[in-house]
Image (spheres, rainbow, N blue to C red):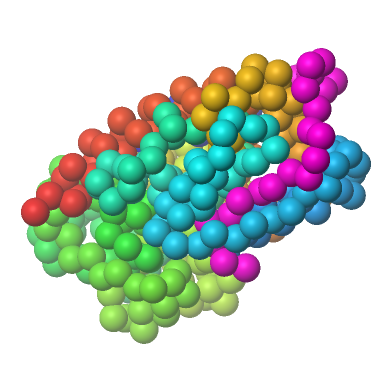
Amino acid sequence: MILRKFAGMAAAVCISVTAHAEGWNPERAIEIVAGSGAGGAQDRTARAMQRIWKEEGIIAVATSVVNKPGGGGAVSLAYLNQRAADGHYIAVGSPTLLINHIAGTGKLNYTDMTPLALLFSEYIVLAVREDSPIRTGEDLVRRLKTDPSSISAAVATARGGMQHVTVGLVAKAAGADPRKLRVVVFDSGGESITAAMGGHVDVVATAAANAAQQMRNGRLRVIGVAAPRRLEGVYANVPTWSEQGYEVVASNWRSVLGLRGMTPAQVAWWDSVLGKLVQTPEWNEDIRKNEWANNYLNSADTRVFLAAQYESLRSILAELLAR
């Protein structure tokens, strides 16, 4: 299970935002590094942060978004890591940082950075074509128990990504060998959904927001949500995997990372401005529209969260990526 206790932590945490820490305030423009091109997931997060900080007057200095796509976020973090400890540079992070390090395709880990915040979680859903004989999560589990190789699953955009992890966790919770699943990798979430709607694969694992419109159109049926509690809106009547008896929680969360060696005063300043960000109506409207979960964690709790995520991902990836 991917850190269930932290996924629900926001409900029990009252965010305390203090005045900017004495001893440090930014002296020049702040750079927000995004590991995707314009319009990509990390870019959209970075630009939402930038926009709200400016509109709300939360940060007095100028901010800029610098796009460094490539290597599943590795290029952006390498760019960030070239600088000495400096609170003027931050990056948007995702599970790819941990996955790349575990898989040996990335040298940097969260321990090479200063974790500053968990912003939100983008939970993964499993969906089937509306007329699929797999009507419920339990239907899929029965198939997995009987013959996991009979199930083809669409994921994007790489083996070992969070979509693949989610399918693997469901198979493992069912008592099946996750390595026997037939996993088909697509270049985008849209392509993977199209494959499921066309009947080319049995099931698709994708972000909740990606499947929402096709659910409304009656072209997809979501059979399980990998969240600790039910989502709202179009997903209000869709059970979580936990409700169906299988402890599966997985998401493409977004974090904020700073340079290694940041001072306590710099970290405290970022705790303040990030805490203010997630309390704004504009941020929470973005959360609602994108089917995200606002489970903000501050810098100290984010470090604990990332450590637990790393161990959980290492366990399942050892099976999924075994040769």
Q: Quadrant of the C terminus?
A: bottom left
Q: Does the magenta stretch include residue 278?
A: no
42, above or below 103, in the image: below
The quadrant holding residue 311 is: top left
Q: Please tell me in which quadrant of the rendered image residue 91 appears.
A: top right
Q: Which residue is drawn at 64% across and 32% down?
A: 86
Residue 103 visible in image:
yes
Give percent across and percent down for residue 25.
80, 27
Residue at 38% over, 27% down: 308
Q: Would you say 109 lies left or right of 103 here?
A: right
Residue extending farthest to the bottom is 198
Is 17 magenta? The answer is yes
- Left or right? Give the position of 231 relative to 77: right
Depth check: give the residue in front, 288 or 128: 288
Q: State the image coordinates of residue 179 (x, y, percent, origin top left).
A: 14, 54
- Magenta segment, prevailing SS (helix, strand or loop): loop
- Relative to 169, say whether 148 is above or below: below
Q: What stretch is highlighted in magenta?
A: 12-39
